Amino acid sequence: MTARSIVLDVIVCSALISACDKGGQWQLALRFLQEGMPAATVDANIVAWNSAMSATERAMQWPKALSLLFTLGSMRLDATVESYSCSVSASGKRGQWPWALRLFARMADRQVERDLITINSLVTSCVLMWSAGSALQVVKDVQSDNMDLDACVLPSLVEAYTDMRDGVAALDILGDVRRTLKERLGRGR
């Protein structure tokens, strides 16, 4: 197959951006999204935007990830859980956990379902920046939404309190986990 026989459409362009992401070429991914696709008169879809956000997240370019997220509306695209997850993770990895918390709250405001990947990224970033109180608040908020937390989120939280030498809080969290497990077993889950 020659380059001339490839028809540039949104699928090919999204795949190219995704390949740039996997290859660590975040600048090329952004350039193609913002310049290459318009030049080829191909309208980007949310898959292309999320691939570019993933590239910026992997490169820990949190301002770029946020810029892409906030630009979605002007492109008449709706942010997905993947859009927010990339931005939360990128912010958290660079110690910008207050931004990550804002984005997480915005997900609820925009009625974007919050998933365990995003929650774990947020809790982990709070823990890494010694904000165990923020991490605990996230967990409490999510539990009040009746979301099941898995084995990835809760150990991070227990570790945070253990590292802070707050054994009482760590034991409280473990007690909550125990109660949740008993409830699940009682319901046959």
Image (cartoon, rainbow, N blue to C red):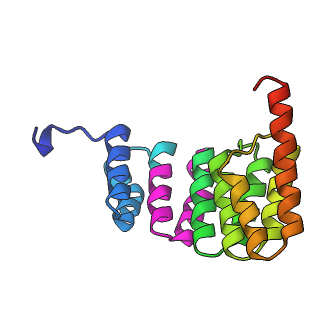
Residue shown at 87% from the left, 65% from the top = 169
Can the viewer see residue 79?
A: no
Query: x and y percent of residue 115 in the render?
Result: 67, 44
Viewer-nearest residue: 61 or 35: 61
Indicate whether 37 appears above or below 182. below
Residue shown at 14% from the left, 37% from the top = 5
Query: x and y percent of residue 104 in the render?
Result: 73, 56
Give the quarter of the image for residue 179: top right
Position of 69 with respect to 170 (left or right) is left
Position of 188 with respect to 70 (left or right) is right
Viewer-nearest residue: 71 or 178: 178
* Magenta-colored segment: predominant secondary structure: helix
Indicate whether 19 appears above or below 12. below
Residue numbers of the magenta segment: 49-77
Query: x and y percent of residue 2 in the render?
Result: 10, 42
Indicate whether 8 appears above or below 61. above
Residue shown at 61% from the left, 53% from the top = 85
Residue shown at 66% from the left, 67% from the top = 125
Give the quarter of the image for residue 185: top right
Which residue is most to the top? Answer: 188
Tell me if residue 62 is in the magenta stretch: yes
Viewer-nearest residue: 116 or 178: 178
Tell me if residue 135 is in the magenta stretch: no
Query: x and y percent of residue 29 in the render?
Result: 37, 59
Viewer-nearest residue: 83 or 134: 134
Position of 78 with respect to 25 (left or right) is right
